[in-house]
């Protein structure tokens, strides 16, 4: 998926005026946010669990080389194969070569953000391999030729009417008269189509929600069971995952899974949580004959060495975007790449390049909700501020912004002048705006007043009000 993050502003404006998208985005607040709150509130010590998850990830990242070597040795011991992909091109070549060696005609694919990151579908189709997404949301957007708009619910931007129309076009060639159908009917129809693909597939490709160094295992977490069918029915199973998905032990994996389900979908545990260790063994009744795991770097080692290491704690739950007022207003496509929302505003510039994603670090109000709900306590607002600082240092901020900051800094270094001007400005604005209590239009603040009124300030500065209150309390 080619990055279009440089078009964030026009894409965001378009999203704000898209009635179908606005209708669909209401499901984020109605579903994910409320369900997460319910399961978190009834958990005895969720903050303790978050802290344990943070410590596990920090320890793993500090010793990542050791645990990667242990993981590789355990995968080999279980009869599997480990492939190291430093870049997108290397990952594409590894997976397409495996498919060619297997004479694959059809590949079924579970939801994998790492696969989206390296444009795996496009590479397989270019190699002449039919690739079918088996997660229902991914299947819907594959029919629509669209990228996912959410890392947990890829088609959350679609209304039921749009999905009905898609299925009518692709499954019935537009012959159905009753185009708007109920959800169970749509799900059953997709199952009927996908069932034949599951049975015909030569290779199954999945992601991995968690990798375990102790056993060489991976965990697949789904609510549809498509992950199990994708990895167990074909002759060959290929998993692709970022190197940061590793944890040391099965006990650590259990901690992460407890955090993941509650933070992502508001469940105590997802419907299907499967541990996969190598290919089929002699006593097994099902499973692949070959197992391959592709470990993806793609900029992660670079992050590991710098101040953005904490971003590698991310377990891809989507809680940050579910609680983000910006994402809730514009959806995921406006962010222009695989990872939307607050985590994407940090991760995309680090992988794609800050020069090509200038708007993303600024697509945030710094309200802090993302950090408060992150299951592994990633300080997303701090990382976004760091990216803004890096933009400024590399002259990537607009010239008007740089001039404005320079003028403000000049006054801020002269407190008496700054305070005098602040008193004069606030006093004037307070007098002008006291009749209505707000400003509909304000010079240099058009970005604010285009969507909301600007409250008229009280006719004194905060410092003066604080001194007055302190004097009254003595």
Image (cartoon, rainbow, N blue to C red):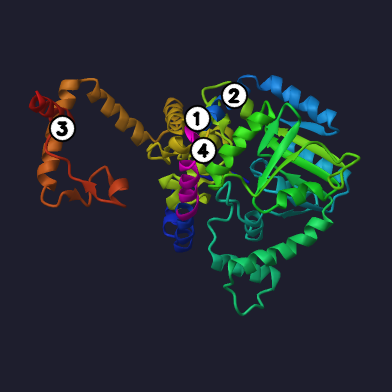
> Disc 3 or 4, which lies upstream in sequence?
4
**Left or right side of 322 for 465:** left
Q: Which residues are magenta?
A: 30-47
Whether residues under marks 2 and 3 lie with C-beta atoms below 8 angstroms apart, the answer is: no
> Disc 1 or 3, which lies upstream in sequence?
1
**CA distance for labels 4 and 1:** 22 Å
**CA distance for labels 2 and 3:** 44 Å
The verdict on residue 267 being magenta is no
User: What percent of the width, then of the height, locates residue 43?
Assistant: 50, 39
Residue name at image x 55 percent, y 24 percent: 55
> Disc 4 or 1, which lies upstream in sequence?
1
| Residue receiving disc 2 | 304
Main SS, magenta region, reads helix
| Residue receiving disc 4 | 343
| Quarter of the figure with residue 57 | top right
> Disc 1 or 2, which lies upstream in sequence?
1
**Left or right side of 305 for 191:** right
């Amino acid at each position: 998926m080619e990055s279009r993050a440089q078009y964030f502003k026009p894409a965001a404006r378009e999203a704000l005026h898209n009635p179908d998208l606005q209708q669909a985005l209401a499901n984020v607040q109605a579903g994910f946010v409320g369900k997460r709150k319910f399961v978190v509130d009834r958990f005895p010590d969720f903050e303790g669990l978050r802290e344990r998850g943070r410590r596990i990830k920090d320890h793993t990242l500090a010793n990542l080389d050791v645990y990667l070597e242990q993981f590789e040795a355990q995968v080999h011991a279980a009869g599997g194969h480990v492939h190291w992909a430093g870049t997108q091109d290397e990952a594409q070549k590894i997976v397409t070569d495996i498919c060619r060696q297997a004479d694959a005609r059809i590949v079924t694919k579970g939801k994998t953000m790492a696969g989206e990151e390296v444009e795996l579908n496009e590479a397989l189709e270019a190699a002449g391999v039919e690739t079918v997404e088996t997660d229902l949301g991914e299947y819907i957007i594959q029919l629509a030729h669209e990228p996912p708009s959410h890392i947990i619910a890829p088609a959350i931007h679609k209304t039921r009417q749009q999905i009905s129309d898609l299925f009518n076009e692709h499954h019935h060639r537009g012959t159905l008269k009753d185009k708007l159908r109920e959800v169970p009917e749509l799900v059953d129809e997709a199952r009927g189509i996908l069932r034949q693909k599951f049975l015909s597939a030569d290779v199954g490709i999945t992601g991995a929600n968690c990798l375990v160094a102790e056993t060489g295992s991976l965990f697949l977490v789904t609510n549809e069971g498509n992950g199990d069918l994708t990895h167990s029915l074909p002759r060959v199973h290929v998993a692709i995952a970022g190197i940061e998905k590793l944890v040391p032990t099965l006990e650590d994996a259990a901690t992460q899974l407890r955090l993941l389900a509650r933070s992502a979908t508001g469940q105590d545990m997802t419907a299907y949580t499967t541990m996969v260790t190598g290919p089929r063994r002699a006593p097994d009744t099902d499973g692949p004959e070959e197992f391959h795991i592709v470990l993806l770097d793609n900029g992660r080692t670079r992050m590991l060495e710098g101040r953005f290491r904490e971003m590698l704690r991310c377990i891809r739950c989507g809680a940050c975007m579910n609680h983000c007022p910006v994402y809730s207003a514009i959806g995921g496509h406006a962010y222009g790449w695989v990872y939307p929302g607050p985590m994407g505003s940090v991760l995309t510039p680090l992988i794609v390049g800050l020069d090509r994603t200038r708007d993303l670090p600024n697509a945030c109000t710094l309200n802090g909700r993302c950090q408060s709900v992150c299951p592994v306590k990633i300080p997303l607002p701090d990382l976004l501020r760091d990216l803004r600082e890096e933009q400024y240092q590399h002259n990537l901020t607009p010239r008007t912004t740089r001039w404005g900051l320079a003028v403000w800094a000049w006054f801020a270094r002269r407190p008496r002048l700054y305070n005098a001007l602040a008193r004069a400005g606030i006093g004037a604005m307070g007098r002008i705006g006291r009749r209505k209590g707000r400003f509909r239009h304000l010079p240099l603040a058009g970005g604010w007043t285009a969507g909301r009124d600007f409250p008229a300030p009280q006719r004194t500065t905060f410092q003066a009000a604080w001194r007055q209150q302190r004097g009254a309390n003595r």
